[in-house]
Amino acid sequence: MTEARALRELCTAALRPEQHPEPLDEELAALARREKLAPLLGGLCLDGRLEAEPAARLLLVEAHHRCLAQHRVAERALADTVTALAARDIRPMLLKGMALSRRLYGPGRRSMRDVDLLVPAQQFRAARAELEALGARADDDGTRRVTMWLFHEVDLRMPSGAAIDLHRGLSPWPIFTVDHTAVLARGAREADGLLVPDASDLMVMLAMHAAGDGFAVPLRAVVDGLALAPHARAQEVLERARSWHARRATAAWLWALLGYGLAPDGGGGLGWRGVAEALDGSAGARALAALVPSRLPQRLRMWHLRARTARALDGVARPAAFYAWRGLLYVGDWVMRRSR
């Protein structure tokens, strides 16, 4: 079996297990682990919705149980965080993995390295202070003080070991221009007080995140997009991508999803293919889509990432300004290290 066919089989198993009558074998299970889908498939095995050969089932179910344990640690940290931030009238929004877990999957089925939280920019320092009062510490070695002071996010490690990525913005300046106030206002409030993004906002966020990673994302990201699409509205995705200057990134993301079975006329209005065409139907956007899923080459990895991200941004001034700004931050970090 070719890898392309195996990847499509995993998509079917994850999203439509009733259409995958053959038990998953150990080779497919190992590919699912590499592509970060093993926890979801393990949960489907336990539900009785997906069949797998004994060795494959063991691998998948173990991955689900590990993910479930990590999820419980993260939820405990979130409970403490929500209580502390509520005392300062700060209402955070879940992003990325935990937002998808809450909206689509349930506990233990969507792996994540950390929990991403968005707070209003004017409350960012107060939110960080509250988390540090709970024992959180910046998850860095102190060599990037200028960058971390001005960056759009900071990685914090809680005493429990849970990692919280606290955001004042969705992306570094100036690659995208997100109206964060509107994003927070459109969010749906969960029972514990946390906000979850509107589905159309979240679809563009997935595209932005993929672009920031040079479209070197695992198959898990494709499944995220395909699972989210029925909840999003194509016209709103089009409007968000345009207003956030994320046209090419979103177009490339939609072309990638269309290649993995996204219904072209889904989402209402223009449909997903119409939105992709309206945003960027060029060969350049389709070439970026062809990178999904993939991994960055180990040789010159950072340069590949930067080149791919630059190709995904709208225009030429925006990536030039971004890399110039990042360069200034790195110079500031070097000066701070020397001064100490």
Image: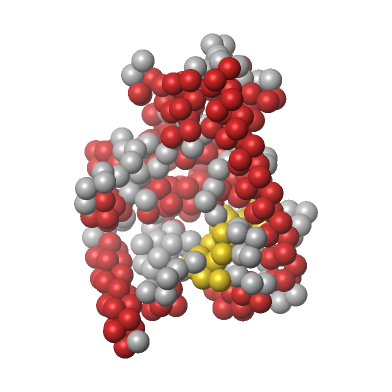
The residue located at (44%, 77%) in the rendering is 149
Horizontally, residue 156 falls left or right of residue 264, namely right
Looking at the image, which residue sits at the far bottom? 339
Number of callouts: 0
Q: At 48% from the left edge and 52% from the top edge, which residue is drawn?
A: 205
Picture coordinates of residue 141 (x, y %)?
42, 71
Which residue is painted at 64% across and 23% down in the image?
45
Please tell me which residue lies in front, 211 or 24.
24
258 left or right of 295 in image: right
In the rendering, at what x and y percent does residue 44 appear? 64, 26
Can see residue 256? yes
Task: Between residue 222 and residue 243, name the one nearer to us.
Answer: 222
Residue 73 at x, y percent in the picture: 67, 53
Of residues 160 and 301, the one drawn nearer to the viewer in this rendering: 160
The quadrant holding residue 157 is bottom right
Rendered position, 99 above or below 5: below
Screen quadrant of the N terminus: top left
Which quadrant, please, contains the C terminus? Answer: bottom left
The answer to whether residue 118 is visible is no
What residue appears at the point 40 percent right and 48 percent down from the top-left corner?
210
